[in-house]
Image: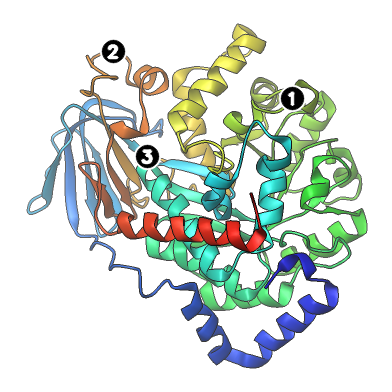
Amino acid sequence: MDFRKVDRRTVLKITAALAAAGPAGRLFAQGAAGASRYAKPLPARGEFVVRGATVLSMDANVGDFERGDVHVRDGAIVAVGQSLAAVGAAAIDGRGMICMPGFIDTHWHLWTTVCRPLIRIDDPKRSYFPATVALGRHFTAEDSYRSVRLGLAEALYAGATTVHNWSHNVPTPAHADAELRAMRDAGIRGRYSYGQFQGMPDDLPMNYDDVGRIKREWMPNDLLTLGMSSRNIGPGIAALRGSITLDMVRKDWGGARALGLPVTLHTSGPSPIRLLDEAKLLGPDVQLVHALLTTAEERQILRERGVSYSVAPIGESRRPASAGEIQLGELLESGVKVSLSIDTTATYDCNYFEAMRLLYNLHQHRIGPRVPVTAKRLAHLATIDGAVDLGVADRTGSLTPGKRADLILVRTGDVNMAPAGGDPYEALLSFAQPRNIDTVVVDGRILRRAGEFTALDYTEVLKEATETAAALRARANWT
């Protein structure tokens, strides 16, 4: 179907037809998404001990260890310390490696990943926004599954163990199921934030019948949570992705809150913070994205309301000066909750080390010592602060006994990192790359070991992502 021609009446017909089809219709849609026939069984959890690693726990009560152990059993962290007794547990040699929590990404448009070969950063007519708006209208549920799966493969390669799938291209219930299935099949932890679709009429409210269905059929889930991606508020770049009135915001956000779901919103362009606050819509269940134009008064409002801000330094640094500046220092100084995101991998790769480096460099260039930011603080931003933002800090974000075992091992003996022996936080910030990540563990399952996927078939992922990109090019007549 060409979603460029979808209007309000057509959307309602599609939704009604799928609802009338009941479970059988949804099962057909789920089969079309193609998850079951691709997914391999995830590795068993079991029991193991990482021994002799440099342990960075991101928990002040646990501390760090120049040479320490992390004991994991049945997906949970049992103990962190030195020379741990763990009779019968398998041993993972952590010597020459940093053991730390996996990265937590708090805002990522995973559905855009397969658009990579179709976007030109130096051609305004074929750059990210016009390309994804045009191509997004041609996505099938199968395309969504394949694109999200490719993005998640890169997430695991780059050391992410939790992602926030900011999905603003959901034309049918089958598309939502497909993206959730890709997350489940990958074995990753994350939030799925259900959004609109490309070209959705601004006067059409969110499809909360289907959001409610997703909550009933997919939640509660050991690894996945659910949220709502809001359309933008006000003029500017938002026009490419929908620009809704305050009345529609009340309807959409009210629907999310009636289901107990958190809300996430881009603030690209003129800031809507005061407008939202005057309407009494801000609260700790709100995450904003792209802190570029906030005022001191607005930051005070955010701190008082408990709102969090997700910063995407790589993408934000590519915006023109008129779009504003990356305000990490101002947010930290004001006591606003901040986290780190990749945003999209349609125009650059997933690299949390680079994101931290760039954020640090830009902060030093703009503010410097007025608001001190250390390498350790940035590592916290990419791990435990992300867990706080997504509301999962009781489960992940630090190597704390009792939490789930989401961790990575980073080799320090590789040519770009050696010789080891200095400050490990400095080594991560200044030198590390995704290729140095040796092992990735999510919920106690080893999903990458010695740099190789243990369950995901990357050859198949690549093949089908390539096919989807070519099919989208043809369907959209994109040259």
| Dot 3 amino acid type | Pro
Residue 430 falls left or right of residue 276 = left
Residue 101: which disc? 3
Residue 422: which disc? 2
**Would you call the spot at circle 2 few (<14 residues within 10 Å), some (14-19), or many (20 or more)?**
few
The picture places residue 228, in percent across and down from the top left corner, at 68, 59
Looking at the image, tell me whether mark 1 or mark 2 is earlier in sequence order: 1
Residue 421 falls left or right of residue 274 = left
Q: Residue at x 56, y 50 (%)?
A: 115
Q: Residue furthest left?
A: 88
- 408 or 370, which lies in front? 408
Q: Secondary structure at mark 2?
A: loop
How many numbered marks are there? 3
Instruction: Point out the frontmost of discs 1 and 2.
Output: 1
Looking at the image, tell me whether mark 2 or mark 3 is earlier in sequence order: 3
Residue 285 is at least partly visible in this image: no
Q: Secondary structure at mark 1?
A: loop
Looking at the image, tell me whether mark 1 or mark 3 is earlier in sequence order: 3
Q: Residue at x 67, y 21 (%)?
A: 333
**Would you call the spot at circle 3 few (<14 residues within 10 Å), some (14-19), or many (20 or more)?**
many
Residue 154 falls left or right of residue 437 = right
Q: Quadrant of residue 425?
A: top left
Location of the N terminus by quadrant is bottom right
| Dot 1 amino acid type | Pro
Q: Residue at x 57, y 88 (%)?
A: 25
Q: CA distance from mark 2 to mark 3?
A: 20 Å
Residue receiving disc 1 = 320
